[in-house]
Amino acid sequence: MKSIVILALLIVFTSCSTKKETEMKDYPIVPVPFTSVKVNDAFWAPRIRLNHDVTIPIALDQCYKTGRVDNFLFAARIKSGSFCTQYPFDDSDIYKIIEGASFSLQTFPDRNLEARIDTLIEYIGKAQEPDGYLYTNRTIDSTNLHPWAGKKRWEKDPEGSHELYNLGHLFEAAVAHYQATGKRSLLDIAIRSADLLVRDFGPGKLAYEPGHQVVEMGLVKMYRVTGKSEYLDLARFFLDIRGKGTEYSQDHMKVTEQTQAVGHAVRAMYMYSGMADVSAITGDQSYVIALDKIWSDLTGSKFYITGGIGAEAGHEGFGPPYVLPNMTAYNETCASIGEVYWNSRMFLLKGESSYYDILERILYNGLISGVSLSGDRFFYPNPLGSKGQYERSEWFGCACCPSNVCRFIPSVPGYVYAHTDERLYVNLFIGSQASIEFGKNILRIDQKTLYPWEGKVEFIIRPEKSTKLELAIRIPGWAQKKPVPGDLYTFSTNDSSTFGITINGEPVDYNMEKGYAVISRKWKDGDRVELQLPMSIKYVKANEKVDADKGRVAIQRGPLVYCAEWPEFADGKVLELEAPRIENLKSEFRPGLLSGVTVISDGNFTAIPYYSWANRGQGEMIVWMKEDSH
Ligand SMILES: [Zn+2]
């Protein structure tokens, strides 16, 4: 926790060189920003492109079509009309799409998109009240409020007005937009709102706890960009006043006393992320002690094999330990995204690979299942079984998931690498070219791989000056016979295959540290590191306490979980399938199927990656098949 990092750690400032660089304490490990990692592989690069070309534009169109933009125009008195969408948090979708567009613009400069965003920012500015208050529902007509909004500002936030939630997303969008474009337009709006919060809330002032967390993360980002410590203090205040309400919004006890993942899953993930942020900056370990317990509870008893979390639809949240029904699994796409946010932060605090084992499982399974291969259809829940009742939708009345996809996908390259002064961490295997600053030296690292389809990963190291550095390569748990860190899932397949590492074709000495193979040497231009991960097909079994998976197995190969879906079966029936004998199963890449996937097949039986299901119409699907009875 000693290392001091420069404010600009998450950022490539291209057009704001006048910015004062303030040194502040932050995470001991620094992520390499997505702007420094150019993804060029066959798996992620097309998804990031599709998000820019299809998902963001249609999400913007939907905001116009559904009245979300009109709400701002009404509040700005540019048009007259009354609040015309279903929820008071609909403002947040626009903020999240601006955040996503801002990220995406850094990879794909696009004047048309930038202009569309500028127009929205102008409306947002005009919808903001002079003192910084921004909540279209009240500004449009304070005498005809949404039932969730209180008569007075903020007073019903704990019960669901979402005034603070909207601002949390505004703050995140403003920081992203400023970093992407150097324009202060949205940042200045956000500063006015954040300053209002500082005036209204705090010791001796209002003490309403945020009903739907995210303002804590947003305030921390605002603090990083502005250096205003009041924002950090307020984030901490909003965490520390919890404990007066219900489990639903993790308000049932002080955050530092919480030990279990409970309540609404998205709220939980955003709160835990905020706790990690505040802890990283303030050094307060009491948050981390709580987070460690909650993380063990979640990954040990409330976590689907696809990475999905939040088993129950009723409260969009966690059920009891080990109660993980498959066909009704809720597993909101937003909860998966929030889980990535939280686990990446835990890694940055501690440098342990187990957080990335969880993160990778979510990323390749229960998160990208949230968007169709065409980029224009979305899942809100991500169940693990279907009778044919599920299909992705164009949009939702509550559109949190599509707008979250918009902002998450462009940020994926930012999860590949991280570093300290003396170590480079490789966390994800994604073909890319990265450029990383180590003091006065610049290290380029090219990654070449056909992951997740093949296990060979090649790194070409290109330091500007030959330099001593530790390269820490994450060896996934699944490559070391452990699908997850706890005992919720285990491989039932005996398999002796293991990973291997060479440098310039020669075996190399490395130390295993916290799940990483650490190679320490003086690197010279062109050094070639090759990692070979074992891509054997394995059956996974759930802990016997999970009734829903009793007598059943799931297929995993590499980081991917597989499912059987109706189009591969003549009668379209898969729910009663018995798992084939594993020794008969083979993997085979089919470039023409589902945008190119490796299937697992024995001739009669074919399984596809879970994320790719429901792209060919409605029908049966199953992840957990009956165990082979032979
Ligand atoms: Zn959602």
Image: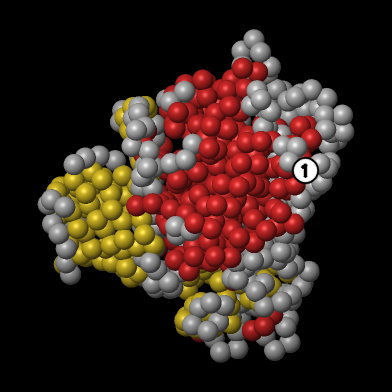
> Does residue 14 appear in this view?
yes
Image coords of residue 578 (percent x, y): 65, 78
Task: Answer with the quarter of the image where residue 501 lies.
Answer: bottom left
Q: Residue furthest front?
A: 78
Q: Is residue 337 above or below residue 619?
A: above
> Does residue 383 appear in this view?
no
Task: Answer with the quarter of the image where residue 622 lies.
Answer: bottom right
Q: Residue at image x 79%, y 35%?
A: 140
Q: 460 or 118, which is in the foreground?
A: 118
Q: State which quarter of the image contains the N terminus.
A: top left
Image coords of residue 554 (percent x, y): 59, 68
Q: Residue at image x 39%, y 62%?
A: 39
Image coords of residue 455 (percent x, y): 37, 70
Residue corresponding to mark 1: 79
Q: 616 or 291, which is in the foreground?
A: 616
Image coords of residue 271 (percent x, y): 59, 35
Q: Residues within 10 Å of mark 1 (few under 14, many from 20)?
A: few
Q: Residue at image x 28%, y 66%?
A: 458
